[in-house]
Image: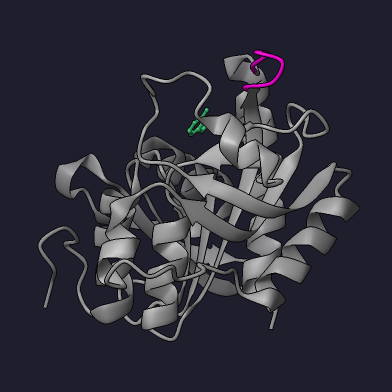
Amino acid sequence: MTTPHLAAKPGDIADIVLLPGDPLRAKLIAERFFDNPQCYNEVRGMYGFTGSYKGRRVSVQGTGMGIPSISIYAHELMATYGAKTLVRVGTCGAIQAQVGLRDLVVAQAASTDSSLISTRFKGMSFAPTADFDLLRRAWQSAVSRGFNVHVGNVLSTDTFYDEEPDAWKLWARYNVLALEMEAAGLYTLAARHGARALAVLMVSDSLVTHQKLSPDERQTGFVDMVTAALDAAIAE
Ligand code: HPA
C-alpha cells in the first residue's frame, strides 16, 4: 500500500528517517552519505531515499516547509511505513545574541504560534518535546565535531514574512533560541505515534544582528550538521 504523498512500497523506508525541508537536500544527503541509495519517492518532487550509513539502513525524506507539510510526511512515515526515529535537519534564525551564525540549535522543546496543535488539544497547551536519548547523542556528536551547540526551546512559526517585524521579541524574552517552521509539528505527531523525534538546526541567519550565511557557508555547515545528526540517529 502506498500513501497519497509517498509512492514507496511497504519495507522501502527504514525505521530511521532524516527529514530535511528541502527535497534537493534529501538527494544531496543520500548521494553524499548513503551506500547504495535508492529513490523511493518523487511524488510532488518531494524526494525520499533509502540506503545505508555505517552499515545501518536509513532513509531521508524531504518534508517541505511549515507544520502542515511536515505533518503529512511524518504521519505517513509513522502510520504506514513504521518509522520510529525521525530527525529533522534544517536551518533556523537566531533570536538570541549569544546564538551565532553556523552554531547548532538542538531543539529540546518547540513552542509554536500555529493553531494546529492548540486546536488538536481543544485550546489547551501541549508541550512538544524532543526524545532525550537522541538529544543527548546529537549534542555529544555535534560538540565533538567542533560545533558551538545550544540546547533549548525554539519557535516553530507559521509566518516567515510577519507583518509585525518585531513579533519574535516576545518569544526572545522567554529565552526561545531560534525560529524555524516544523519541529513542534514533528514532536507532537511523534508523541502520538510512539516514535522518537529530534530537530537539529544550523543557524543560517540572525534576527538580532541581521547577518546571514552565504549559500556556500550554508552548504558546508549543513553537511557537517548532517554527520552529527546521522551519528545520533543510528546509535543503539
Ligand atoms: N524564520 C523562520 N524559519 C527560518 C528562519 C527564520 O528567520 N531562518 C531559517 N529558518
| Side (left or right) of 157 relative to 215 | left
Viewer-nearest residue: 176 or 83: 176
Which image quarter is the N terminus in?
Answer: bottom left
Q: Quadrant of residue 131?
A: bottom right
Residue 14 visible to the viewer: no
Residue 135 visible to the viewer: yes
Viewer-nearest residue: 205 or 20: 205
Which image quarter is the C terminus in?
Answer: bottom right
Please identify the dominant SS of the magenta region: loop
The residue drawn where x is 71% and y is 46% is 175
The residue drawn where x is 79% and y is 60% is 139
Q: Is residue 61 above or below residue 234?
A: above
Viewer-nearest residue: 116 or 71: 116
- Magenta segment boundaries in residue numbering: 207-212
Which x, y percent locates residue 45?
Answer: 22, 40
Q: Is residue 82 above or below residue 146?
A: below
Viewer-nearest residue: 231 or 90: 90
Residue 210 magenta = yes
